[in-house]
């Protein structure tokens, strides 16, 4: 199940096909799609097709499903299997209000019996694909039920469990409690993966030591640094780190990612979607904030590419030109 113990987390609005391919180009054990709502998967909406059709993947990828109805989740799992998923992951961890209000995501940690029925239904429908689940420590500090919840998921057929080391009440605030994942690891026999606040190889090592987990899942730490999973795998292997891309190499990477986003979504939507990635690259590279302001104003891809070149190609962040001067 864990050929390489460093996984890319499913992140809505982030882990689309262009980003997954980029991360895999640096190396990762397994990459996950954005979360797909089961009812939209069954309805085969355009959004679910963009997120859930993995047939064009160059490497195996997992598809994450969210939903609260076992029968609908089963139908979605069959479609996911037919759409090229190598693994089906069930979302029991999303803390977003719009997801929780539909009794999905981390809301199901308050309904463990229903969650177990969902796992059973998806396991039957997805056969022969493996089924995994992603959860949190619990709903809040007064109901940290992750070990018992994990046992139910394992008994229902889940082959691996990922634990985001926060409660739903915390959402993404505070700090991940990696040590609180250790009781989950002791409670089950299937592999357990620790997730949350892993943004460096040092944090990865600490998370593994405190949790006893079999692997790590990296999420927001990879935004703007798609090479972070490579660094983590090198660290686990005791091998020296590789310097991150800089200068022309970084500019080429950012331009390549930008072009892939436009190809995937089309120009109007792609220009808007790419802006958050450009901001993450800028933050990671220490680029002056004026870059983000300029990138957010530009709508012509050629102008954005010129801005990227003039900003990232220099060994040190380059002074920015006004948007009107970019076409000169």
Image (cartoon, rainbow, N blue to C red):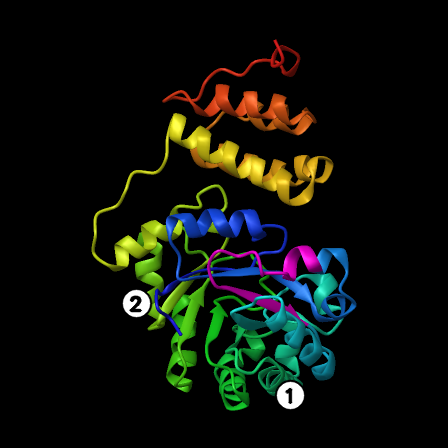
Q: Quadrant of residue 39?
A: bottom right
Quadrant assignment for the C terminus: top right
The segment highlighted magenta reads 49-66
Compare residues 85 and 291 and report the one nearer the observer: 85
Q: Mark 2, residues whose alpha carbon is within 10 Å: few (<14), some, or many (≥20)? A: few
Where residue 186 appears, as percent x and y from the top left, is 37, 83
Q: Is residue 181 left or right of residue 238?
A: right
Q: Quadrant of residue 171?
A: bottom right
Where residue 173 appears, as percent x and y from the top left, is 55, 56
In the displayed structure, 210 sits above or below 280; it is below
Compare residues 209 and 121 and report the one nearer the observer: 121
At horizontal 60% and vertical 83% (from top left) the residue drawn is 119
Disc 2 secondary structure class: helix
Q: Quadrant of residue 29?
A: bottom left
Where residue 227 appears, as percent x and y from the top left, is 39, 46
Where residue 88 appears, as percent x and y from the top left, is 56, 73
Q: Mark 1, residues whose alpha carbon is within 10 Å: few (<14), some, or many (≥20)? A: some
Q: Is residue 265 magenta?
A: no
In the displayed structure, 270 sits above or below 162; it is above
At horizontal 35% and vertical 64% (from top left) the residue drawn is 4
Q: Is residue 219 left or right of residue 84?
A: left
Q: Is residue 247 left or right of residue 95?
A: left
Q: Is residue 286 visible?
A: no
Tell me how far mark 2 sits from mark 1, CA to CA. Answer: 33 Å
Q: Is residue 252 left or right of residue 65?
A: left
Q: Which mark is residue 117?
A: 1
Residue holding disc 2 = 209
């Amino acid at each position: 199940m864990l050929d390489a113990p460093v996984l890319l987390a499913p992140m809505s609005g982030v882990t689309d096909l262009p980003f997954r391919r980029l991360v895999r180009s640096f190396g990762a054990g397994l990459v996950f799609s954005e979360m797909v709502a089961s009812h939209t998967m069954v309805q085969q909406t355009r959004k679910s097709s963009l997120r859930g059709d993995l047939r064009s993947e160059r490497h195996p990828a997992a598809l994450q499903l969210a939903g609260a109805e076992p029968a609908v989740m089963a139908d979605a799992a069959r479609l996911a299997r037919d759409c090229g998923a190598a693994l089906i992951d069930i979302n029991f961890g999303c803390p977003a209000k719009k997801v929780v209000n539909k009794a999905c995501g981390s809301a199901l940690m308050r309904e463990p019996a229903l969650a177990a029925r969902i796992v059973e239904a998806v396991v039957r429908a997805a056969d022969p694909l493996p089924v995994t689940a992603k959860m949190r420590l619990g709903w809040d500090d007064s109901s940290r039920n992750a070990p018992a919840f994990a046992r139910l998921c394992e008994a229902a057929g889940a082959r691996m469990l990922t634990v985001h080391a926060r409660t739903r009440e915390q959402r993404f605030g505070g700090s991940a409690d990696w040590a609180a994942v250790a009781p989950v690891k002791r409670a089950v026999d299937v592999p357990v993966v620790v997730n949350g606040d892993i943004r460096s190889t040092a944090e990865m090592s600490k998370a593994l030591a405190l949790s006893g987990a079999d692997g790590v899942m990296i999420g927001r730490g990879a935004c703007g640094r798609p090479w972070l999973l490579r660094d983590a795998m090198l660290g686990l292997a005791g091998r020296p780190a590789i310097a991150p891309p800089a200068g022309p190499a970084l500019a080429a990477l950012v331009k390549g990612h930008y072009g892939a986003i436009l190809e995937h979504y089309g120009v109007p939507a792609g220009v808007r979607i790419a802006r958050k990635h450009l901001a993450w690259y800028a933050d990671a590279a220490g680029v002056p904030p004026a870059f983000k302001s300029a990138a957010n104003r530009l709508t012509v891809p050629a102008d954005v590419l010129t801005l990227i070149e003039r900003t990232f190609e220099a060994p040190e962040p380059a002074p920015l030109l006004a948007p009107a001067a970019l076409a000169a």
